[in-house]
Image (spheres, rainbow, N blue to C red):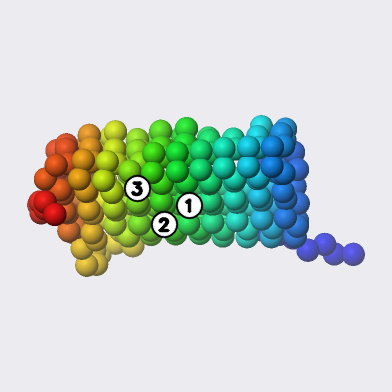
Amino acid sequence: MKRSRILLPYPVLATLLLSGCLSVNQSLTVADGANHSGNLSSVNGTIQVGRNATVDGDLSTVNGSVTVGDQSEVGDIETVNGRVELGNGVTASNIGAVNGRIVLGVGSRVNGSVETVNGEVTVGPEGSVSGRVSTVNGKIVLSGASAGSLDNYAGGMLLEAGSQVHGELHIKRPRRGGEPDEPVLVEIHAGCEVAGPLRFDRPVTLRIHQSATVGNIIGAEPEYFSE
Protein backbone atom coordinates (compact mmCIF):
# COMPACT_ATOMS: atom_id res chain seq x y z
CA MET A 1 0.00 0.00 0.00
CA LYS A 2 1.37 3.39 -0.99
CA ARG A 3 1.88 5.74 1.94
CA SER A 4 1.11 9.42 1.78
CA ARG A 5 3.90 11.84 2.61
CA ILE A 6 3.87 15.15 4.46
CA LEU A 7 6.44 17.47 2.94
CA LEU A 8 7.95 19.87 5.47
CA PRO A 9 10.78 22.43 5.38
CA TYR A 10 14.01 20.64 6.24
CA PRO A 11 14.75 22.47 9.54
CA VAL A 12 11.22 21.77 10.76
CA LEU A 13 11.37 18.14 9.62
CA ALA A 14 14.66 17.65 11.42
CA THR A 15 13.19 19.07 14.60
CA LEU A 16 10.20 16.75 14.41
CA LEU A 17 12.29 13.66 13.75
CA LEU A 18 14.48 14.39 16.76
CA SER A 19 11.46 15.13 18.92
CA GLY A 20 10.73 13.20 22.05
CA CYS A 21 6.97 13.31 21.34
CA LEU A 22 5.50 13.62 17.83
CA SER A 23 1.76 13.92 17.22
CA VAL A 24 -0.02 13.98 13.83
CA ASN A 25 -3.55 15.40 13.56
CA GLN A 26 -3.77 15.68 17.33
CA SER A 27 -3.12 18.43 19.85
CA LEU A 28 -0.70 18.16 22.76
CA THR A 29 -1.33 19.51 26.26
CA VAL A 30 0.85 19.93 29.34
CA ALA A 31 -1.32 20.37 32.43
CA ASP A 32 -1.06 23.21 34.93
CA GLY A 33 1.90 22.69 37.25
CA ALA A 34 3.22 19.69 35.31
CA ASN A 35 6.85 18.96 34.42
CA HIS A 36 7.54 17.44 31.00
CA SER A 37 10.95 16.17 29.93
CA GLY A 38 11.65 16.10 26.19
CA ASN A 39 10.47 17.86 23.06
CA LEU A 40 6.83 18.24 21.98
CA SER A 41 6.00 18.34 18.25
CA SER A 42 2.74 18.32 16.33
CA VAL A 43 1.64 18.26 12.70
CA ASN A 44 -1.88 19.65 12.18
CA GLY A 45 -2.40 20.18 15.89
CA THR A 46 -1.88 22.74 18.62
CA ILE A 47 0.42 22.67 21.63
CA GLN A 48 -0.86 24.09 24.90
CA VAL A 49 1.25 24.37 28.03
CA GLY A 50 -0.65 25.20 31.21
CA ARG A 51 0.23 27.61 33.99
CA ASN A 52 3.27 27.09 36.25
CA ALA A 53 4.45 24.24 34.05
CA THR A 54 7.94 23.32 32.87
CA VAL A 55 8.90 21.74 29.56
CA ASP A 56 12.54 20.66 29.53
CA GLY A 57 12.63 20.65 25.75
CA ASP A 58 11.39 22.43 22.64
CA LEU A 59 7.91 22.98 21.18
CA SER A 60 7.27 22.79 17.42
CA THR A 61 4.16 22.67 15.25
CA VAL A 62 3.19 22.64 11.59
CA ASN A 63 -0.30 24.05 10.97
CA GLY A 64 -1.02 24.73 14.61
CA SER A 65 -0.60 27.34 17.32
CA VAL A 66 1.49 27.24 20.49
CA THR A 67 0.15 28.66 23.76
CA VAL A 68 2.12 28.81 27.00
CA GLY A 69 0.38 29.68 30.26
CA ASP A 70 1.45 32.14 32.94
CA GLN A 71 4.71 31.57 34.84
CA SER A 72 5.73 28.56 32.75
CA GLU A 73 9.16 27.75 31.33
CA VAL A 74 9.92 26.15 27.96
CA GLY A 75 12.79 25.79 25.48
CA ASP A 76 12.68 26.85 21.82
CA ILE A 77 9.32 27.40 20.10
CA GLU A 78 8.90 26.91 16.33
CA THR A 79 5.74 27.01 14.25
CA VAL A 80 4.78 27.00 10.58
CA ASN A 81 1.31 28.44 9.93
CA GLY A 82 0.33 29.18 13.51
CA ARG A 83 0.52 31.87 16.16
CA VAL A 84 2.62 31.82 19.32
CA GLU A 85 1.19 33.27 22.53
CA LEU A 86 3.04 33.46 25.83
CA GLY A 87 1.14 34.33 29.00
CA ASN A 88 2.51 36.51 31.79
CA GLY A 89 5.88 35.74 33.33
CA VAL A 90 6.79 33.02 30.83
CA THR A 91 10.41 32.14 30.03
CA ALA A 92 11.42 30.71 26.62
CA SER A 93 14.73 30.23 24.82
CA ASN A 94 13.96 31.31 21.21
CA ILE A 95 10.80 31.76 19.14
CA GLY A 96 10.55 31.28 15.36
CA ALA A 97 7.50 31.37 13.10
CA VAL A 98 6.84 31.37 9.35
CA ASN A 99 3.22 32.53 9.11
CA GLY A 100 1.95 33.61 12.48
CA ARG A 101 1.67 36.35 15.04
CA ILE A 102 3.87 36.23 18.15
CA VAL A 103 2.67 37.72 21.45
CA LEU A 104 4.60 37.89 24.72
CA GLY A 105 2.62 38.64 27.87
CA VAL A 106 3.48 40.90 30.78
CA GLY A 107 6.95 40.21 32.16
CA SER A 108 7.67 37.33 29.77
CA ARG A 109 11.27 36.74 28.81
CA VAL A 110 12.92 35.22 25.74
CA ASN A 111 16.59 34.54 26.33
CA GLY A 112 17.44 34.43 22.62
CA SER A 113 15.69 35.80 19.53
CA VAL A 114 12.09 36.22 18.30
CA GLU A 115 11.65 35.94 14.52
CA THR A 116 8.67 35.61 12.16
CA VAL A 117 8.24 35.99 8.41
CA ASN A 118 4.58 37.01 8.07
CA GLY A 119 3.14 38.24 11.33
CA GLU A 120 3.20 40.93 13.98
CA VAL A 121 5.39 40.65 17.07
CA THR A 122 4.17 42.22 20.32
CA VAL A 123 6.22 42.24 23.52
CA GLY A 124 4.07 43.15 26.51
CA PRO A 125 4.90 45.46 29.45
CA GLU A 126 8.12 44.57 31.30
CA GLY A 127 8.75 41.81 28.78
CA SER A 128 12.23 41.26 27.37
CA VAL A 129 13.97 39.65 24.41
CA SER A 130 17.70 39.35 24.94
CA GLY A 131 18.48 39.00 21.24
CA ARG A 132 16.92 40.16 18.00
CA VAL A 133 13.24 40.78 17.29
CA SER A 134 12.77 40.39 13.54
CA THR A 135 9.91 40.27 11.02
CA VAL A 136 9.70 40.45 7.24
CA ASN A 137 6.05 41.45 6.81
CA GLY A 138 4.72 42.51 10.16
CA LYS A 139 4.71 45.28 12.72
CA ILE A 140 6.94 45.16 15.79
CA VAL A 141 5.44 46.54 19.00
CA LEU A 142 7.30 47.01 22.29
CA SER A 143 4.77 47.94 24.98
CA GLY A 144 7.12 49.20 27.67
CA ALA A 145 9.41 46.25 26.95
CA SER A 146 13.04 45.71 25.95
CA ALA A 147 14.90 43.96 23.13
CA GLY A 148 18.47 43.48 22.01
CA SER A 149 17.76 44.79 18.48
CA LEU A 150 14.87 45.26 16.05
CA ASP A 151 14.63 44.76 12.30
CA ASN A 152 11.96 44.33 9.64
CA TYR A 153 11.13 45.15 6.02
CA ALA A 154 7.47 46.16 6.09
CA GLY A 155 4.92 46.83 8.81
CA GLY A 156 6.71 49.51 10.77
CA MET A 157 7.55 49.69 14.45
CA LEU A 158 5.95 51.10 17.59
CA LEU A 159 7.95 51.64 20.76
CA GLU A 160 5.51 52.58 23.49
CA ALA A 161 6.49 54.62 26.55
CA GLY A 162 9.54 53.36 28.43
CA SER A 163 10.66 50.75 25.90
CA GLN A 164 14.34 49.99 25.40
CA VAL A 165 16.38 48.70 22.47
CA HIS A 166 19.92 47.88 23.52
CA GLY A 167 21.31 47.74 19.99
CA GLU A 168 20.35 48.51 16.40
CA LEU A 169 16.94 49.45 15.03
CA HIS A 170 16.92 48.62 11.31
CA ILE A 171 14.25 49.00 8.61
CA LYS A 172 15.49 47.04 5.59
CA ARG A 173 14.79 47.43 1.88
CA PRO A 174 12.14 44.98 0.62
CA ARG A 175 13.61 41.83 -0.85
CA ARG A 176 11.48 41.88 -3.99
CA GLY A 177 13.67 44.61 -5.50
CA GLY A 178 12.65 47.82 -7.23
CA GLU A 179 11.55 50.96 -5.47
CA PRO A 180 10.03 50.58 -1.99
CA ASP A 181 6.34 51.31 -1.45
CA GLU A 182 4.92 54.12 0.67
CA PRO A 183 6.91 55.05 3.78
CA VAL A 184 6.40 52.84 6.82
CA LEU A 185 5.77 54.40 10.23
CA VAL A 186 8.26 54.15 13.06
CA GLU A 187 7.15 55.76 16.34
CA ILE A 188 9.31 56.08 19.46
CA HIS A 189 7.36 57.34 22.45
CA ALA A 190 8.16 59.08 25.73
CA GLY A 191 11.04 57.80 27.83
CA CYS A 192 12.23 55.25 25.29
CA GLU A 193 15.90 54.45 24.83
CA VAL A 194 17.38 53.13 21.59
CA ALA A 195 21.15 52.66 21.69
CA GLY A 196 21.30 52.52 17.92
CA PRO A 197 22.25 53.09 15.31
CA LEU A 198 18.82 53.64 13.80
CA ARG A 199 19.28 52.56 10.18
CA PHE A 200 16.71 53.02 7.41
CA ASP A 201 17.21 51.47 3.97
CA ARG A 202 13.76 52.49 2.68
CA PRO A 203 11.50 55.56 3.08
CA VAL A 204 10.04 55.89 6.58
CA THR A 205 8.07 58.34 8.65
CA LEU A 206 10.14 58.55 11.82
CA ARG A 207 8.41 60.13 14.84
CA ILE A 208 10.41 60.48 18.05
CA HIS A 209 9.17 61.89 21.37
CA GLN A 210 11.30 64.73 22.68
CA SER A 211 12.01 62.84 25.90
CA ALA A 212 13.29 59.72 24.12
CA THR A 213 17.01 58.98 23.85
CA VAL A 214 18.24 57.54 20.56
CA GLY A 215 21.54 56.82 18.88
CA ASN A 216 22.83 57.84 15.47
CA ILE A 217 20.11 58.09 12.78
CA ILE A 218 21.04 56.96 9.26
CA GLY A 219 18.74 57.33 6.25
CA ALA A 220 15.82 59.33 7.72
CA GLU A 221 14.91 62.75 9.07
CA PRO A 222 13.07 62.51 12.39
CA GLU A 223 9.93 64.39 13.34
CA TYR A 224 9.95 65.24 17.04
CA PHE A 225 6.73 65.44 19.05
CA SER A 226 5.86 66.31 22.65
CA GLU A 227 2.20 65.38 23.15
Does the image show residue 224? yes
Mark 1 / mark 3, whichever is N-terminal: 1
10 w.r.t. 101: above or below? above
**Amino acid on which the number 2 mark rests in the picture:** Glu
Residue ID at (38%, 59%)? 137
In the rendered structure, find residue 102 and report the number of the disc placed on it.
1
| Residue 130: % across, % down | 40, 33
Residue ID at (26%, 46%)? 161
Residue at which label 3 appears: 143
Q: Secondary structure at mark 1?
A: strand
Choose between 27 and 161: the one closer to the eye: 161
Choose between 15 and 106: the one closer to the eye: 106
Residue at which label 2 appears: 120
Image label count: 3
Near mark 1 (Cα within 10 A), the count class, few <14, some 14-19 or many ≥20, is: many
Residue ID at (29%, 53%)? 157
Which part of the image, by quadrant, shows the N terminus? bottom right
Marks 3/2: CA–CA distance: 13 Å
Mark 3 / mark 2, whichever is N-terminal: 2
Does the image show residue 172? no
Whether pointer 1 and pointer 3 mark residues with C-beta atoms closer than 8 Å, the reply is no
| Residue 174: % across, % down | 30, 58
Choose between 214 and 87: the one closer to the eye: 87
Near mark 3 (Cα within 10 A), the count class, few <14, some 14-19 or many ≥20, is: many
Which part of the image, by quadrant, shows the C terminus? bottom left
Whether pointer 3 and pointer 2 mark residues with C-beta atoms closer than 8 Å, the reply is no
| Residue 101: % across, % down | 48, 57
